[in-house]
Image (cartoon, rainbow, N blue to C red):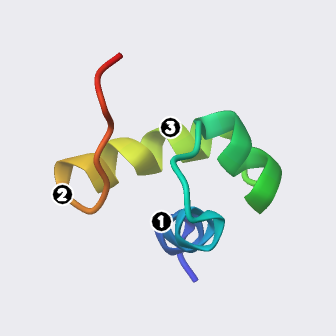
Amino acid sequence: MSDEDTILKAMKDAGKPLRPGEIADLTGLPKEVISKAMKSLKKDGKVDSPKR
């Protein structure tokens, strides 16, 4: 399973929006890996990041 798949599964299983730190806690992946994967997922339209 790719890092992106791992992140998407964690987000789906949580059933709520997650911050990168929460994803790191759930997956055990380093925050740097999550940040890079999230940029790719956003670009591909697989996740949405609300503006604060």
Residue projecting furthest to the front: 16
Q: Foreground residue, 23 or 13?
A: 13
Q: Rate crowding at label 1 as few (under 14), some (14 to 19) or many (20 or more) other CA atoms within 10 Å.
A: some
Q: Position of residue 24 (x, y in %)?
A: 73, 46
Q: Position of residue 35 (x, y in %)?
A: 50, 37
Q: Which mark is residue 45?
A: 2
Task: Give the mark nearer the N terminus: 1 vs 2.
Answer: 1
**Quadrant in which residue 46 is drawn:** bottom left
- Write the residue at 56% across / 74% down: 9
Kindly identify which residue carries mark 3: 35
Task: Give the mark nearer the N terminus: 3 vs 2.
Answer: 3
Task: Give the mark nearer the N terminus: 3 vs 1.
Answer: 1
Relative to 45, residue 39 above or below: above
Locate residue 51 relative to residue 22 in the image: left or right: left
> Mark 1 falls on what kind of element?
helix
- Amino acid type, callout 3: Ser
Q: Are marks 1 and 2 in contact (CB under 8 Å)?
A: no
